[in-house]
Image: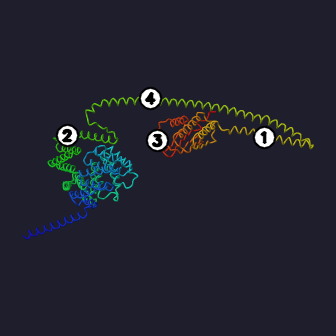
Amino acid sequence: MKNHRFIQLLFFIFLFFGCAKKEKEKNFLNTTKDSLSIYFSLANDLNYNIEDRQMFNKKAFNVVVDQENDSLNRVNLFRVANRYYNINNWNDYIKTVLLVLEKSENARDTINIGKANSYLGDYYSSQMVSDSAFQFYSTAEKIYDKLGDNINLGKTLINKATLQFKAGDFYGADNTIIKALRKIRKEKQVNSIMYDAYNLQGLISNELGDFENAISYNNKALSVIDDNLIPEQFQSRATSYNNIGYLYLSSKKYQQAKEYFLMGLKQNNLKTQKPSLYVLLLDNIAYAKFKLNETSDLPDLFFQSLKFKDSLKITNGVFVNKIHLSEYFASQQDTLNALKYSNEALFLAKSTNVSRDVLVALKQLSIIQPKNAAVYNKEYIQINENLQKAERSMGDKFSRIEYETDQIKSQNSSLEVQNRNLVYAFSLITILGLFLYIIKAQKNKNRVLLYKQQQQKANEDIYNLMITQQNTIETNRVEEKKRVAQELHDGVLGRMFGVRMNLDSLNKYQDEVAVNQRSGYLSELKNIEQDIREISHDLNREKSELINNFVAIVDNLFEEQRKTFQSKLISSIDSTIKWELLENAVKINLYRIIQESLQNINKYAQANTIKVELKKNEGNLVLVISDDGIGFNAKVKKKGIGIQNMRSRTKECNGEFHIKSKKGEGTSSTVIIPIEQKLIPT
């Protein structure tokens, strides 16, 4: 009787405090029913069950939905959607996202349009509709790229890469990750994106059989973890330790795998903050111990992990757990339990429609039941072929979405059949017409090129004639000056010298008149002698210092440039260069290179200043032409023949041609020709 009363009293106490707690919560919610921050906070509070969190979020939605469509309203709708996502309420999640997308489009809010498309990608990804998810992520990617929002762009690219990885497009996924890392490399506080990127690259490398790179990427992921930027509740370190342990497990390095799984389990608050990861680590460490023959706490660890998953309704990893149990019991010769867990794993894989898991289960069953291996292997081959086809199909879909080459198909199949032949015929005619146009255009291009080559040949011939004519005139002029100089020196000067000597012989006459006359004649003759000597020396000096005709021709080109164009031209020609000793072919090529460079600068560079320098440097003739124009990408091959001609002319002289240019930084062309190879043979 006393025990009965004690139980009644205890029940009354619990009932009282339970009612008091509910009444307190009811009063609290009534006093704060218009406070969105309270609703949002309670909807994310893990101390409440899912039904209560759903109720709090619904209250928040009811407050937000009727508010004015402004930026704050749209932000709050996204907050509602986030909480629906956290409790896996996909129906209300998609409705909220579509609503905020509609409001963003009405307000022409590009930022939130991109965000809504990203959320839609998350939805379809959760529903395993990969092509739709990829489409929405691609739309968000374009918007973020246009806005220059590299952080959200990087997150979206990682989501796309994840879809490609799941579809078996490992190389495509790796390229997308690299693109994401390039976009965020100059941004700050992007550790979480880099962490996800490196983790995914580790998974990709593992699938491709590159163990060393897989380990390297996971270590990189560990190195970017910053508790100030990546919240502790994400349990990033535990995730990375589990990933690295899994890599060692796959490589049959079970001791190292076990050590990393233990490090993962030692992370603070892992069991409460990320229970799904906690049970996964439990299962993995149990499997590592099984492979190390450390069976003292087996199969209890496997069952502990499985039981914890059941209690929290965690479906992720249950399949692997059952496969591990099947392997363990098979090793213990317990065929009955091995078959039980293999069949349960197969049923689970088929119910979730995960083809890869079905293959793993069939393989395990064929090991346990060798007699039925043929049946399992037949089903295995069929599913594997279907999986490969599905992966290729999904990869093709991703490619079409990526490069926007999807064609709109007619809903009326009969109309499509009727129009197909017309489309083929039109395409054939278009291709034929395009082909003919290309041939004609190429012929015209070749004709123009041939004409230019002929014109250049004619110009060279004309220039050779000019050079020859100039050389003839110059030679005759020099010879004439030399003859005059010799005549003055050997003829007139000699006679004057004889007269001076004759007058000097009159010194024997000592009268005053003779002396004065003689002195006057001698003085005058000395002056004449000096004048003639100076004239002779000047004529010979003029010959040696006369500017070569090539320099005159180049100066004429520079003068014409200055008269015709506004650009300031600064020219410098080294006076120590002996042009008369260089072959005409070298001069012709140099002249044409200068002419072609000036022409290109006038056409394209928009330069204010042009500098042309011809100098002698360590036995080489160096031509440098530079400008301060708009420049261009020198690494991109040009269609014109200007630069190719300059290279070809330099090559004819056994020289070197270099061109440096960047957009906005002008252009500099350098020609280096060895002088000693180009001297006229004597």
User: Which numbered mark, 4 or 2, is in the foreground of this view?
Assistant: 4
Q: For label 2, count other residues whose C-alpha is less than 10 Å away and answer few (under 14), some (14-19) or many (20+).
A: some
Question: Looking at the picture, how far across and down is residue 210, in whole percent?
Answer: 32, 46
What amino acid is at disc 2?
Glu
- Secondary structure under the numbered disc 4 in the rendered image: helix
Residue 31 placement, left or right of 610: left
- State the image quarter where residue 512 is shown: top right
Q: Which mark is residue 635?
A: 3
Q: Which mark is residue 24?
A: none
- Secondary structure under the numbered disc 2 in the rendered image: helix
Quadrant of the image containing the N terminus: bottom left
User: Which numbered mark, 2 or 1, is in the foreground of this view?
Assistant: 1
Q: Is residue 667 above or below residue 473?
A: below
Residue 445 placement, left or right of 471: left
What amino acid is at disc 4?
Lys
Question: Label 4 to label 2, Cα distance in Å?
Answer: 59 Å
The residue where tag 1 is placed is 531
Q: Nearer the viewer, residue 96 or 643?
A: 96
Q: Nearer the viewer, residue 10 or 415?
A: 415
Q: Which mark is residue 379?
A: 2
Sequence-wise, the earlier of marks 4 and 1 is 4
Which residue sits furthest left?
1
Sequence-wise, the earlier of marks 2 and 3 is 2
Question: Looking at the picture, how far across and down is residue 594, in whole percent?
Answer: 57, 38
The residue where tag 4 is placed is 440
Question: Label 3 to label 1, Cα distance in Å?
Answer: 64 Å
Which residue sits furthest right?
511
CB within 8 Å, label 3 to label 1 = no
